[in-house]
Amino acid sequence: MYQPNEEGFYGEFGGSFVPPELEDVLKSLKKDFYELREKDDFKDELAMYLKDYVGRPSPLYYAEKMTRELGGAKIYLKREDLNHTGSHKINNTVGQALLAKRLGKTRIIAETGAGQHGVATATVCALFGMKCTIYMGAEDIRRQELNVFRMKILGAEVVPVTRGTATLKEAVDVALEEFVAHHTDTYYMLGSAVGPDPYPEMVKYFQSIIGREVRQQIMEKEGKLPDYLVACVGGGSNSIGLFADFYEDSSVQMIGAEPAGLGLSTCKHAATLSAGKPGIIQGFKCYLLQEDNGEVMEAYSVAAGLDYPGVGPEHSFYKDSGRAQYVTITDQEAIDAFLYLSKTEGIIPALESSHAIAEVLKLAPTLSKEQIIVCNVSGRGDKDASEVFRILNGKLS
């Protein structure tokens, strides 16, 4: 597993570019995180909740029918959609909530795009008796009504963000502002492997259980490591969770599927690693969608959890170092993959995960039957059913 340097940089990416009033808060958080992750009682408590509350380990499922139809590599699906709350997000929120609890925090704030991180945050706040405020773009609230309702059922306050594109970037902006203003009693539970140091490292730490389980499960099933790992990339938490444990295994190729939206030739996409360039956003350096004058471009994806103009710093480092390859998937390809997996394997994936499935549909037929692909199904598609229904009925605007 690749580790950042003392300043939180992965190569030239990462770091902490924050207001002075937040510097000491983040340094203290990093120190506390480093100390707690070495304590057996913290690790034991985390393992207990992941097993008995989240339902880990999540299965590694051999997609036999899909493999047969595509006629190439064996396809395994890592079933993060079967976790409690329906996605990989709960791995991180349980870990960070236990950290916040030990730090004596009484209130949790978070941002959310697709709503899965918001639901997972509201869930652990209910579990541990903490106040919860979720910031969510007004456009994402429209697209994810079911998850908004779930958050409210769980006791969270959901605050609409109307500035800018009213999506994930703006929700992060507002959450960071709130954290600066109320950091004495408030813990900011960032949901992806982005943000200022130490958040990318913390989120990777809590999500890396995905890859550790895959390593053990694929060895039990096949007696060898996979040839390819495939996952969607927005901010990048599910993919870095899958990739991290295989960083040193050069035989394992890693592919991140980015949202090409309506096409890279349009302004309606969020393919940060494929079409962006290095820059600083929300306290860290990464590949970033930018205008010619350096202004941050608006990001777009049919998948609410992927429409972010930046990306995790470790993914940025993987791209530059060549350790991972990043490809683009259009909205239409993702929707087609959503329907394909639903009809072929009886698994309705999240639109975010459908980007990874779409890449598998392209990749598998080009490989031999002896090769193995592991694809991360990062979430289930219940939350997207109404949006896909709207799109398929010709109402895509």
Image (cartoon, grey):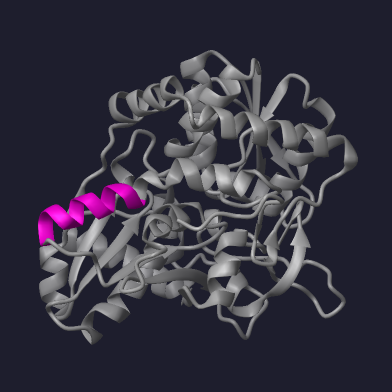
Camera-side residue of 245 and 93: 245
| Residue name at image x 48 percent, y 34 percent | 120
Give yes or no for residue 391 being in the magenta stretch: no
The correct choice, above or below, for 234 with respect to 394 in the image is above
The correct choice, above or below, for 146 with respect to 379 in the image is above
Q: Where residue 238 sits in the image (x, y, percent)? A: 44, 53
Query: Can residue 55 be seen at all in this image of the molecule?
Result: yes
Q: If the image is split into quadrants, where does the C terminus sit?
A: bottom right
| Residue name at image x 41 percent, y 44 percent | 88
| Residue name at image x 16 percent, y 68 percent | 66
Camera-side residue of 34 and 89: 34
Q: Where residue 381 sits in the image (x, y, percent)? A: 36, 50
Q: Is residue 242 left or right of residue 269?
A: left
| Residue name at image x 48 percent, y 43 percent | 205
Q: If the image is split into quadrants, where does the N terminus sit?
A: bottom left
Give yes or no for residue 221 being in the magenta stretch: yes
What's drawn in magenta, residue-wise? 211-222
